[in-house]
Structure formats: structure tokens, C-alpha cells
Image: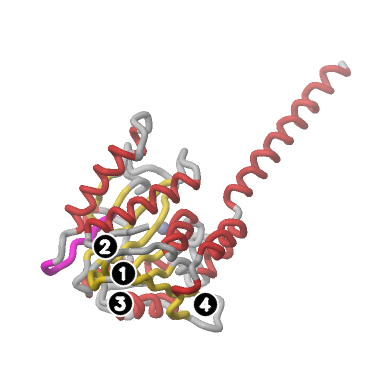
């Protein structure tokens, strides 16, 4: 009788300890403080060219990297959603790149108030739904970001994100996807560029055994993600090619997410005439 009462409580204690350990591991993995500190440490402050929303809780830096030769301009954004760590860590690392031609304008910690809370949404809601086409962006932060994007007169815009799931085999999530928005004019089409980069990633980086982690291209017009996305506004109002890169954290560790997000960005830039030299 005694043993019978002891066993369940022992088992409960063990289960409790296991749950606590798993919770501790998850919180270490997801700790916004540690990820944000790493991202801040990675920023190359010699490349800081401006601060948007100065003096507010949205205050964040804009960075510029210029090549020796004139060439295309790309805008890269990370951390539009505050819990998508891969995007802002990759963007922070990119501030240290050297390029041969053209220039990069980088906003690595776009939604710093959301990043600090490790939340998708910031105080003004979902930042990547506040860029309606043909109208003013719907928050002061969105307006400040849009001014940077517009003033850069970009050939290419790359917005770095992460999904909870996988696009394949069902389409509820858009993890492991490059969303494309073709330019209106004569510029190189996002469609072709993304197809090339996806083949490159699937052949060289995604292991054969990870069939459902193979990358896929989806046109922004073919997916129901509502309106007000930055790349939709870029498509409608600027003559620029744009991409939204969605990694996943489903069965994929953070370092691999960062590495793949970085490699995709590097490849998309190369296909658009900006070659990384270190
Ligand atoms: Zn996102």
C-alpha cells in the first residue's frame, strides 16, 4: 500500500523535474535577452548612418555598407516580428559584410519594442500589416521604416522572417518559403532569382533526409496573408524586386535557421548584382 502511494508521487516528481528541465531548455533557447545581446554585439557601429524613432521605445539603428564600385542598392530588414530571432541575428551579422559593388541599407532590429518582449507583435500590433498600398503606413514606426526604404531607392528589398511550421506538406504555415514580389518595370524578376536560390539551397544546404524542409517559392499574390505587408507596398509603389524569406523553427535549431537565412540573403543579393567579398 505504501509502495503504491509512493510510486505515483515519485513518478509525478520525476515528470515535474523533466517538465521543468525542458521548460528551462526552451527558455534558454528562446531567451530574447541573450539573442538580442548577441545581435547588438554583432552590429558594426562604424556603419551606423541613422537612428529612427530616436528617443522612443522604438529607437533603432540604420546601417549602410558600400562597395568600391557603384551598383544596385538593397534594403535588408530583420526583426519586423519580435520573436523571429533568425531574421534579426542574420541582419545584425550582415552589418559586418564587405561587398564589391552597390550598397546595402540594413535595419537589423526593425521592431525593437517587440524584440525586447520576444513577441511577434509590438505595441502597435503586427508591424508587417501596417504598410497598406497607396496609403500612409499605419504607425509612426512603420512610417519611419517606409521613409528609409523609399529614400534608399532600392533595386531589391529583402525582409527576413520565421514561421512556426512548414509550407510542405500542407499550406497552413509558410516556413521554408521565399515569398516573391516581382518589380513592375524592367528589373530582374524576383521569380527567377528566387527559383535559382531555392535550387541552390535544396541542393547544397538542406540534407536529403529533410524532405519537408526543402525550400519553395510562393508569389505574394498567390498566398492569403492579408494586406499591409511591406513587400506588397514595395511592389505597388516602388520599382523594386522584393522578397520575404521565411525560415522555420519546426525541427530546426536556431543556428541553422540563422545560417540558412544568411545564405539565402547572400545568394539573392548575388543574383541581383551585389557580391559579398568576405
Ligand atoms: Zn514574420
Q: Does the magenta stretch include residue 180?
A: yes
Q: Looking at the image, is mark 4 or mark 3 earlier in the sequence? A: 4
Give the Cα distance between marks 4 and 2: 29 Å
Give the Cα distance between marks 1 and 2: 9 Å
Disc 1 crowd, CA 10 A, few/some/many (<14, 14-19, 20+): some
Question: Magenta residues, as a range?
Answer: 179-186
- Disc number placed over residue 152 in the picture, else none: 3
Seen at 83% across and 22% down, the residue is 5
Secondary element type, mark 3: helix
Q: Does the residue labelled 1 lie within 8 Å of ligand 1?
A: no
Residue under label 1: 67
Q: Looking at the image, is mark 1 or mark 4 earlier in the sequence? A: 4
Q: Are circles 2 and 3 on residues that touch, CB within 8 Å? A: no
Give the Cα distance between marks 3 and 1: 15 Å
Q: Is mark 4 within 8 Å of ligand 1?
A: no
- Disc number placed over residue 181 in the picture, else none: none
Residue 9 vertical position relative to residue 69 in the rendered view, above or below: above
- Disc number placed over residue 59 in the picture, else none: 4
Secondary element type, mark 2: loop
Q: In which quarter of the image is residue 271?
A: bottom left
Residue under label 2: 274
Please name whichever residue, 67 or 199, is drawn nearer the observer in this view of the structure. Answer: 67
Chief SS of the magenta region: loop
Secondary element type, mark 4: loop
Give the Cα distance between marks 1 and 4: 27 Å
Seen at 80% across and 21% down, the residue is 7
Q: Does the magenta stretch include residue 225?
A: no
Nearest to viewer (mark 1 / mark 4): 1
Nearest to viewer (mark 3 / mark 1): 1
Q: Which residue lies furthest to the bottom in this view?
A: 55
Task: Please give left or right for residue 60 compared with residue 27 in the image.
Answer: left
Amino acid at each position: 500500500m505504501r509502495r503504491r502511494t509512493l510510486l505515483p508521487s515519485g513518478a509525478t516528481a520525476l515528470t515535474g523535474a523533466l517538465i521543468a528541465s525542458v521548460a528551462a531548455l526552451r527558455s534558454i533557447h528562446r531567451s530574447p535577452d541573450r539573442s538580442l545581446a548577441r545581435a547588438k554585439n554583432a552590429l558594426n557601429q562604424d556603419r551606423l548612418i541613422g537612428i529612427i524613432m530616436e528617443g522612443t521605445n522604438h529607437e533603432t539603428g540604420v546601417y549602410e555598407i558600400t562597395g568600391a564600385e557603384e551598383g544596385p542598392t538593397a534594403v535588408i530588414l530583420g526583426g519586423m516580428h519580435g520573436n523571429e530571432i533568425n531574421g534579426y541575428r542574420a541582419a545584425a551579422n550582415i552589418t559586418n559584410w564587405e561587398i564589391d559593388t552597390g550598397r546595402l541599407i540594413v535595419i537589423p532590429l526593425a521592431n525593437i519594442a517587440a524584440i525586447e518582449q520576444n513577441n511577434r507583435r509590438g505595441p502597435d500590433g503586427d508591424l508587417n500589416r501596417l504598410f497598406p498600398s497607396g496609403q500612409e503606413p499605419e504607425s509612426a514606426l512603420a512610417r519611419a521604416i517606409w521613409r528609409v526604404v523609399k529614400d534608399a531607392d532600392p533595386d531589391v528589398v529583402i525582409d527576413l522572417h520565421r514561421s512556426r511550421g512548414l509550407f510542405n506538406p500542407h499550406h497552413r504555415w509558410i516556413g521554408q518559403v521565399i515569398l516573391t514580389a516581382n518589380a513592375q518595370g524592367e528589373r530582374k524578376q524576383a521569380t527567377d532569382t528566387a527559383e535559382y536560390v531555392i535550387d541552390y539551397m535544396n541542393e547544397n544546404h538542406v540534407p536529403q533526409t529533410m524532405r519537408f524542409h526543402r525550400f519553395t517559392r510562393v508569389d505574394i499574390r498567390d498566398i492569403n496573408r492579408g494586406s499591409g505587408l511591406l513587400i506588397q507596398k514595395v511592389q505597388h509603389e516602388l520599382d523594386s524586386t522584393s522578397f520575404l524569406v521565411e525560415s522555420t523553427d519546426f525541427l530546426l535549431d536556431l543556428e541553422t535557421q540563422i545560417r540558412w537565412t544568411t545564405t539565402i540573403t547572400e545568394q539573392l543579393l548575388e543574383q541581383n548584382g551585389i557580391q559579398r567579398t568576405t
